[in-house]
Amino acid sequence: MEKLIETTNLTYFYRSGTKDEVKALDKVNMNVFQGEILAITGQNGSGKSTLARHFNALLAPGHGDILVKGLSTGNKDNIPEIRKVIGMVFQNPDNQLVSSIVEEDIAFGPENLGLPQAEIIERVDWALHTLNLEDLRNEPPHNLSEGQKQQVAIAGVLAMKPECIVLDEPTAHLDPRGRREVLESAIRLNREEGITIVLLTHFMNEVVHCDRMIVMENGSVKMEGSPGVIFRKSEEIKTAGLDFPVASQIAEGLRREGFNIEPGIIKTEELLESLCQLKSSI
Amino acid sequence: MELTKNITLGVYLPGKSFIHNLDPRTKIIAATIIIILLLLSRSYAAFAVSALFIGSLMVLSGIPTGYALRGLKPMLPVLVIMWIFQLFLFKEPGATIYFHWWIFEATEAGLHMGNLIILRVLFLFTVTTFLTLTTSVVSLTDGLESLLKPLRMIGLPSQELVMTLVIALRFVLILAEELEKIIKAQMARGVAFDRGNFIQKTRKIFPVFLPLFIGAFKRAEELIVAMDARSYTGGRGRTKMKTLHMGRVDLTAAAGMTAYSGLLIYIIIFTKPMI
């Protein structure tokens, strides 16, 4: 697979050069591949947000290098192009919506790109349609639920037609329903529109739906691989301060009680299948 | 405490009336003319004519007058204090004295001055509220942006200013809600905002506004990052999804405005001012 984002020894300090400088990223080497869903997880302060902000040049690397489609984010001239490729959605939807009307807010990005009027309208319609927001078109954001606001924020990024959308804990403020809807949208954008998704999250039940996951700890990559493989490393997951997906917790508990359930279950569907097999074998 | 209930400035009531259908530029220019004329008005006749004109516009728009004026309620104490100050402190030699106590004198000139100031505030508030009630924030800012565009040539960053306004208007309700939350949180911890004398009450306000301001700055910072991520680099090179068009209704409005302005200018020049 083609590398969309590539970091080599990426290091970043907050308050760089002062007495109390903090190393937020420490020689991070990681890749984001074209077309995948990548989950980045880790405790607060593990550096995942700092890493994500390097992806679309909101932060420039202290040491090391980060290439987006071969363009270095350290070079200021590359920034407009990089931001066209990588879109970003943040945690609090209220603090990223600009306009008082949904469709105007979605138009904000394309307007910034200086696109012709007809194309802006077309893109806004498309983004509204793709995220099923057509009914909310003329609503002011404060009439929407938090989940809907986050969908609008995603639509606003989608309208810029990025190749990759980075979602920085997009579900942290949402109720379970909003969380599910945002996750479903992200997965759909990946499967149907072919957009690469980078999802930063604390929720392991979201991680299991991703193709690959990265666990960050103290500013560096602690583990990397498919969720199915990573969640088998129970001890390491615990020391990284993370928990397990609900399905794997149940499976583990049942196994401890002596039921014959195969290891490596992380998704609810897998658990269901395994339980059905168990039932038919009795 | 329901703070958001009393905010009518910046709220938009959608509708299909003649006023709603006007081009925002027409409405902004009309409101500006009315405000200038009101600031020049110094006679009761002029205010009566303006009241009639604005009143009929309100009827045309279908906006309930009571709702439009509700936003005045929190301002009433300030208005009364202003009126009393003018009544006692505005002095003009030879004016009739109604009432005399120690060094304070309530004069006829003071009464008129008080009335004039109150009328001006009332009318300015009503006109601006009426403008925002009948014009969505988006078309209002589109109109402003279009009207201010020529000023770009003399170096005024008109698009950026309008963007600031757009954002400010979007955050009015958010901050009002946040203020309500902070007040409720402090009430839950035993702060009685409605008790005590004026100084004690005022003192209780500070612990409320401090977190509000800090919160607002945090929001602003996050918003900047989000705008940056969406390729915002200022007004240059930006295009717009919607463009404005003037129509027949705007011509009718222009005719109405001309008649009103003509009448008011006549009154301003030829009637005796109240003071």
Image (cartoon, coloured by chain):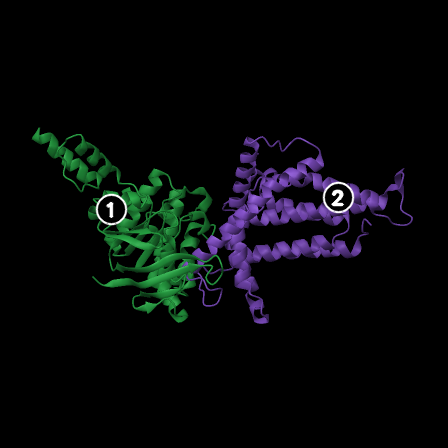
Chain colours: A green, B purple
Q: Taking A267 as reference, is A276 above or below it?
A: above
Task: Establish if B33 lies above or below A274.
Answer: below
Quadrant where the N terminus of chain B sits is: top right
Determine crowd level at label 2: few under 14, some 14-19, many 20+ residues with C-alpha closer than 10 A.
some
* Chain letter belonging to callout 1: A
Q: Are marks 1 and 2 in contact (CB under 8 Å)?
A: no
Q: Mark 2 falls on what kind of element?
A: helix
Q: Which quadrant holds residue B28?
A: bottom right
Residue nearest the observer in this picture, B71 or B112: B71
Residues at marks 1 and 2, CA–CA distance in whole angstroms: 64 Å
Picture coordinates of residue B26, whole percent (x, y): 57, 57
> Which residue bears the numbered disc 2?
B82
Q: Residue at x 18, y 37 (%)?
A: A271
The number of numbered discs placed on residues in the rendered structure image is 2
Amino acid type at image mark 1:
His
User: Does A249 sit left or right of B114 as displayed?
Assistant: left
Instruction: Reply above or below: A44 against B254.
Output: above
* Image disc number at residue A209: 1
